[in-house]
Amino acid sequence: MSFDFNKFLTSTSAKRHVDPVDLFQSLKVIDPKVNDLWLAQGDALRLWHAIRDHEDVAIVLNTGAGKTMIGVITAQSLVNETNDHVLYVCSSIQLVEQTAKKAEGYGLKVTTYYRSDFSNTLYQRGQAPCVTTYHALLNGKSRFLQDLPSAIIFDDAHTVEHLLRDAFSIKIRRETFPKAFSQIVELFRRYYRLIRSGVGYEETKKQRNGNNYWFVPPFALYEQYHELERILLDADLDEELETLFSWEHLKNYLDICALFISGQEIVLTPPVIPVSTIPYFQKGIRRLYLSATLTAGDKFMRTFGRVPEIVTPKTTAGECERLILIPSMHSDCLDDVAIAKSIIREQKALILVPSYRREAIWSDVLTMREKDNITEKIETFKTAETPEKMSLVSRYDGIDFPDKDCRVMVIDDLPSSLNPLEKFFWEKLGLAKYLRSAISSRIIQAFGRISRGMSDYGVVIITSQKLRDWLLEPKNRATLPLFLVQQLELGMNISEDTHPSELEKLASRCLKRNPDWLNLYNKQIQKSNSDVESTTDPQALRISQTEFEFGQALWRRDYEGAARCLSQSLEETFEASANTAAWHLLWLGYCFERLGQKKEAYEAYQRAHNIAHNIPPLHLQDWSNLTPELPNQVLEVARYLYSDPLVMQQSVPKTFDLDLAVLDGTGSPDQIEESLRLLGQYLGLMSTRPEKEFGTGPDVFWDGGVGTALCLEVKSDKQSRSSYIKKDLGQLRDHQQWVRNHSEAKTIYTAFVGLLLPPSLSSNPDPDMDVIELKEFKAIAQRLRAALEDICTQALPSTLPQKIFEVFKQRDLLWPELYRNMEKSKLQELGEKH
């Protein structure tokens, strides 16, 4: 039998094209849907080719505008240029398989790698790119670390932040490591008892609550570091698959991690991912980032530690037709979820939710749940008939249902945090500005799950007040693509003017291509056909760069350099966000502690807690067994008077007078707001400036943690012949509602700070609206100063809380009696006097 050697002959004229457009034109495309490059795809490839030798480039295109084709062509182009290894990285195995299938349709051969298996040898031979997962790339024992690629294409690059966080997070699950879990919980029991949170901490464990995480501050972790290390070593984390890879990253850095404890798991993760230590992000490797939502430089800096050159071809591709309905915009809406359920009742619908708790709200209409086999369910849902309903939990990208696959979607509630650290930032510190670009990215991705092409159309229903309020805020909408903003504004107008009972008919008209709807839509919505604009806030970018540089210095154990990064930018960080600055102060204090500068460390820890009470305090004295139990207000004052274990405060804090100086009326409204915040802080209250911190809410908010809060609107710039107008009153009512939504206070006092002026004739003040002259707060500051002087000269560390309680009670400084006894006037009565 003869052997046919001729079958191994290859064409000597075959050329390996480097120019990506030439490469595409040379391919034998077998996908019937692909005739040629779209204009935007061709522009993107040409623009990238012109700067292909640059190390960091991002191509930003709308969802549905054909990024996968661009990605695989650039990957093969780089293979042809370098004759070396090139990776194309996806967020899941399902997307690896999907990308490989699309590449085949374009006439390209690729290698896939997942579950420790290469599909062929083309990648190793430098003939084709390897399509793999972020898990395979980023885990601590990645096989790609052994032979670094020359280039990497990051698909859906906006997902990398949370995938990096996952790779650098050790998760000690109670079910897998019951002994280690119990030992670590017990290790920090005393700390929480000392700060009088022992009961809640114990309940979290007993009730196996997996939603509530307790943040262990770095100084408390450091106290128990060697025992924590021993427990983790005994647990043999390197023998369990779920901890093997992250342990490799973190095993030598446990003492510079943040620790979170819930009833189900314990998580150790760095405050900042040390990206610069990962070989893929070092010099000599080219990186191409593909995304629809990476134009915010601060988010990119926080994820990758750099800002790339951005390629943004002009295109309307992906700008599909959407009717957006927001039932809660109408005054007659009592239950937006119930209305949404009625709208989708006869429709096939996708329901995006941020948590399993929110998913339970939809259980009566769901026919498929995300907990089931997700890949199988997705394919089943695509071909399912009306009225199937499928939920996805915290999955805002990577799963697409274009055209007839699905035309109706519910986005329920604000996209939530994906890890305990982000959850702490969002729920405990309220870092809305800090997380704005991350939330914006998830919302953009959510809208792209259905209605992806220019000829596609669908209905999107928005539910939950949190998501609605986020979308209403102009600063948040400014981070969204112009085309989506136009659709939202049209949807808001329609929803506000259409009774909830009519929304089902309205959705049906859109889906049935009603001419009146199409006429309205085409007149109101203009195709943007413009570059994707950067939404980078320069200040946010600088803060992100500071955090990145701090994180890298901390990982190198350069505590002095890490402290310098944070301290040099602290003033600007305070200006942007007091709570972000509080987080920085906590880690600045830890750097000081590791440098042996205990006094500076304790001061930083105390300042951090004073600004943001959800940052746990340093405990220097055991006041946990005080009888009678004293209010938290008293303990907060005791903590800042006893922030140095070597010597208790002998007089009022040194910045007290300067901090409160403008309460005499000499400052601007902004300066007065800050002094009022600081006055609340010195009183031992949780005192914040929500309007400045979040872009909404009262100017100043005092909460004593006893069910009574104060909402202040500063109007110190009003003149003597002015009045409190209807807009002022509406603002105060809106901010009172914000307090109801964001605090547990049952009683909410509302007051204007300014002259005793009447309401305007056209306004109708509420009976409980107060007006307080600024001089009243000045008087409180003077009374507080005298009280602190007396306390400091008379108390011992062991008797400090009791002495504060006695003096504050005697001088009407305890909350809420402080407010009840203040000199104030009812706005209604001021109107009656004029």
Image: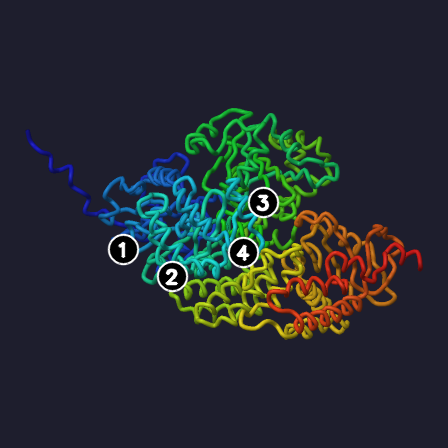
Marking on residue 533: 4
Badge 4 density bin: few <14, some 14–19, many ≥20, Cα 10 Å:
some
State which tag comes first along the sequence, 1 or 2.
1
Q: How far across and down, in percent of the image, does residue 444 sit? A: 54, 46
Res 191 visible: yes
SS state under label 3 = loop
State which tag comes first along the sequence, 1 or 3.
1
Res 22 visible: no
| Distance from Cα at disc 3 to Cα at disc 4 | 24 Å
Q: Nearer the viewer, mark 1 or mark 3?
A: 3
State which tag comes first along the sequence, 2 or 3.
2
Which residue is at the far left?
A: 1
Badge 3 density bin: few <14, some 14–19, many ≥20, Cα 10 Å:
many
- Report the amino acid beneath label 1: Thr
Give the residue displayed 36% in from the left and 44% down from the top. 242
Residue tagged 2:
276
| Distance from Cα at disc 2 to Cα at disc 3 | 32 Å
